Amino acid sequence: MILLLEDDPAIAQTVAFALQREGLAVEHHAWLADARRAWAQQPPRVAVLDIGLPDGSGLDWLRALRQAGDTTPVLLLSARSEELDKVLGLELGADDYLAKPFGVRELVARVRALLRRGAPTSPGLVVGSLDAHVQGRRLDLTRRELALLQALHAAQGRTLSREQLLDAAWGPGSESLDRTVDTHIKTLRAKLREAGLGDDAIRTHRGLGYALDR
Ligand code: CA
């Protein structure tokens, strides 16, 4: 999930739309207090933070996060320019920044870069070529479930359509139905839940497909 903290509705809408179109789940907040609350519940994979917010400063929050040892990749959106860049990079621990106005494609590319370098998959989940483990314990998966999990894992958080998942787990041109994927995702989810991962370890994107949360 990408957390977007931006109080300008036009910018927020453009950014959220662009990221969602890439198959990324976006949680948008306009207030610092709301974003903090959401973060405490579940830290995002990447955060896109505006600096000037109605109830505080994105910079102050970033500083507090880093001081607390939080290493979540952060992209700052800044309305100011060069002078600030140095401060951010050197002192506050932002991973990247963009000065407004920016191109939305540029933003998507940078978020993607941060995702690639970001946190590991769902806590303790290790997906190998022969099996998968959560916190060192081997998951008892069927061949299809493992193939689905491997495909989702390889997609690094991108959403895969049912068709792509069918190809991956049943082979191209398979006669199986989309419903078959749903059924296997359901059992896979149950096994992940049993192993201690949340229900959102595999996210459903209605009408689009599934993605492995990271
Ligand atoms: Ca602002």
Image (cartoon, grey):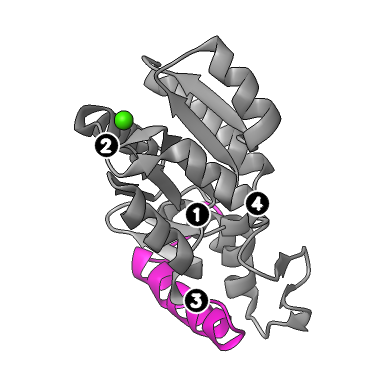
Quick check: is 59 in the magenta stretch?
no
CA–CA distance in space, label 4 to label 2? 25 Å
Task: Report the amino acid beneath label 2.
Answer: Asp
- Disc 1 to disc 2, C-alpha distance: 18 Å
Describe residue 19's horizontal placement relative to residue 189 as left or right: left
Residue pointed to by mark 2: 7
Residue bearing the label numbered 3: 198
| Residue type, numbered disc 1 | Pro
On the rendered structure, is 66 left or right of 16?
A: right
Q: Nearer the viewer, residue 196 or 209?
A: 196
| Lower position in the chain sequence, tag 3 or tag 2 | 2
Mark 1 vs mark 2: in front: 2
Corner quadrant of residue 54: top left
Image spot of residue 17 (x, y percent): 29, 36
State which tag comes first along the sequence, 4 or 2.
2
* Amino acid beneath label 3: Gly
Label pair 1/2, CB-CB below 8 angstroms: no
Q: Quick one: label 4, few (<14), some, or many (20+) residues within 10 Å?
A: few
Distance of label 1 from label 4 (alpha carbons): 17 Å
Q: Which residue position holds label 1?
A: 44
Residue 172: image location, x then y, percent: 54, 52
Res 39 seen here:
yes
Q: Quadrant of residue 137?
A: bottom right
* Picture residue at 56% right of the left edge, 77% below the top: 197
For the residues carrying marks 1 and 4, which lies nearer the camera in this image? 4
Secondary structure found at label 4: helix
Label 2: state its secondary structure.
loop
Tell me which residue sits at (45%, 53%) in the image. Answer: 1
Of the two numbered discs 3 and 2 in the rendering, the one whose residue sits closer to the viewer: 2
Relative vertical location of residue 72 with respect to residue 152 in this rendering, above or below:
above
Disc on the earlier residue, 1 or 4: 1
